[in-house]
Image (cartoon, rainbow, N blue to C red):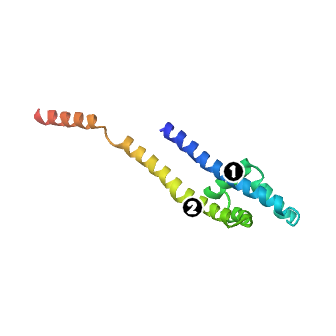
Amino acid sequence: SFISLFWSLIMLGMIVYVFALVFVQAITLYLLENQDTMDSQVHDKVYLYFGSVWRTARTLYQATTGGMDWETAYDLVAPCGWVYAAAFVFYIAFWTFAVMNILTGIFVDNAMKLAAPDREQVMLEQRRKVGADAE
């Protein structure tokens, strides 16, 4: 149904947004501490993928849905520290195993409920069959 789809999209958006905030914070601190020694190509790449909350959210979404290889984003997050590298791997694993499987389960369950015959409909069919057999 559209209601469960709507709330599922809201939930996905919130998960991506929270993790985007975490990674923007980490990248910003890393850039402030290392801007003098950072290669300009790496800086441009970091800005391209993690330059704002929106860009970071897009990068996270692409990394989890096949739009880009998540190793590219990981290689940019890893220099920020092992905590952020672990958080990135956790995000990928959480999204892949938990979120997508739960959402798939919700939609399959809803589809099964819609496909299952209504109890009243089954009883009505049974009565018609008994009535037809009696004639």
Q: Position of residue 82 (x, y in %)?
A: 67, 67
Q: To which residue does mark 2 refer? A: 93
Residue 57 relative to residue 102: left or right: right
Report crowding for label 2: few under 14, some 14 to 19, many 20 or more residues within 10 A (C-alpha): few
Which circle, 1 or 2, is nearer the viewer? 1
In the picture, which quadrant includes the C terminus? top left
Alpha carbon separation for disc pair 1 and 2: 18 Å
Picture residue at 70% right of the left edge, 61% below the top = 73
Picture residue at 82% right of the left edge, 61% below the top = 33
Q: Amino acid at mark 1?
A: Leu
Q: On screen, 36 above or below 99?
A: below
Picture residue at 65% right of the left edge, 58% below the top = 63
- SS under mark 2: helix
Q: Position of residue 111 (x, y in %)?
A: 42, 44
Q: Amino acid at mark 2?
A: Ala
Q: For residue 45, what is the image quadrant?
A: bottom right
Q: For residue 23, what is the image quadrant?
A: bottom right
Q: For residue 40, what is the image quadrant?
A: bottom right
Residue 54 relative to residue 94: left or right: right
Could you tell me if residue 44 is visible in this image? no
Q: Nearer the viewer, residue 108 or 58?
A: 58
Q: Position of residue 58 (x, y in %)?
A: 69, 51
Q: Nearer the viewer, residue 85 or 13?
A: 85
Q: Nearer the viewer, residue 82 or 134?
A: 82
Report crowding for label 1: few under 14, some 14 to 19, many 20 or more residues within 10 A (C-alpha): some
The answer to whether mark 1 and mark 2 are in CB contact below 8 A is no
Identify the disc placed on residue 21.
1
